[in-house]
Image: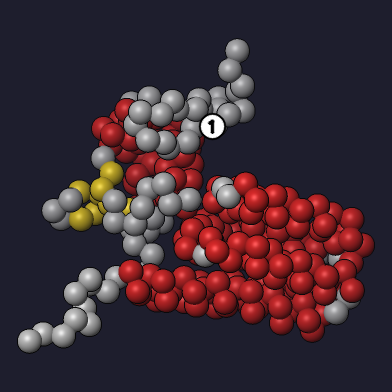
Amino acid sequence: MANPNTVYKITKREDPLERLALHQPLADRVYRAILDAICEGELAPGQRITQDELAARLAVSRQPVLQALRLLKSQSFVRDSRRRGVVVASLDPTFIGHLCEVRSALDGIAGRAAARRGQAEAKLWGPQLIAAGRAAVRAGSVHDLIAADMRFHLFLHELSGNPLIAETAALHWQHIRRVMGGSLSRRYLEWEGIWDEHAAILDAVMEGDADAAERLARRHAEAATVHLIHSIEAESVPEDAGRKTN
């Protein structure tokens, strides 16, 4: 019998599809599968997607795909294009900048509060999260890296002891996850350094150094965002831009 807890994952058409978990409504599971594919870059910005193609790849009818796409459209993960139908929304540098301001502030507050209230828990569980992140680096899996990155930052929020931090972040968490995926997929040469930054944040928390924890958490979020925005802007420059005309 198939594991009922496995979920769909968007793959290439010729690849076998994983089965959907049975404990959630079908539309929710389809929504999650498409969202995961967008956040992890399997469905790229600007890529055209159709109900028929997604339904075929997920082995479901068109109705749950339509419901999922409506929700994703309302959340700005996909959009209508007059000539091409529905496409994956681009990563907008202005929106990313605004999101960074929120994330940087929340992570900074969480880091400071965690250093004051969560030292014991940080020492108990934090090293395991760092080890898992470094294992994901060695495996070279963007999917695993995004998951490890999310776990670390959610752990930092929990250590803060302030539930409003996690609740505020949850409003934008899927967009934050997509930005993480966009950043990680472009910074593959820096994956180890990213986890060095996580380790430094954790060290500050374990040492009870609130100032350092806040400073490092903010710097970490801001550096990732600056790199991603620069990469997106560079990718959007036409190939012949900068060429001199005769």
Residue lying at the far right of the rendered structure: 120
In the picture, measured across the screen, residue 200 lies left or right of residue 30, that is right
In the picture, measured across the screen, residue 230 lies left or right of residue 85, that is right
Front position in the image: 49 or 98: 49
Circle 1 residue? 7
In the picture, measured across the screen, residue 87 lies left or right of residue 152, that is left
Residue lying at the far front of the rendered structure: 246
What colour scheme was applied to this rendering of the protein? secondary structure
Q: Is residue 148 above or below residue 113?
A: above
Residue lying at the far left of the rendered structure: 246
Q: Position of residue 58 (x, y in %)?
A: 39, 29
> Residue 111 occupies which quadrant of the picture?
bottom right
Front position in the image: 199 or 114: 199
**Can residue 228 be spotted in the picture?**
yes
Quarter holding the C terminus is: bottom left
Residue at the (15%, 55%) spot, across then down? 82
Query: For mark 1, does the 10 Å Cα neighbourhood hold few (<14), some (14 to 19), or many (20 or more) residues?
Result: some
**Can residue 78 be spotted in the picture?**
no
Q: Position of residue 67 (x, y in %)?
A: 36, 39
The secondary element bearing badge 1 is classed as loop
> Residue 118 occupies which quadrant of the picture?
bottom right
Q: Position of residue 178 (x, y in %)?
A: 49, 58
Mark 1 residue type = Val
Front position in the image: 155 or 135: 135
In the picture, measured across the screen, residue 239 lies left or right of residue 163, that is left
Residue at the (83%, 70%) spot, across then down? 203
Q: Is residue 6 above or below residue 236?
A: above
Q: Is residue 77 above or below residue 205?
A: above
Residue at the (33%, 69%) spot, across then down? 235
Quarter holding the N terminus is: top right
Q: Position of residue 238 (x, y in %)?
A: 22, 72
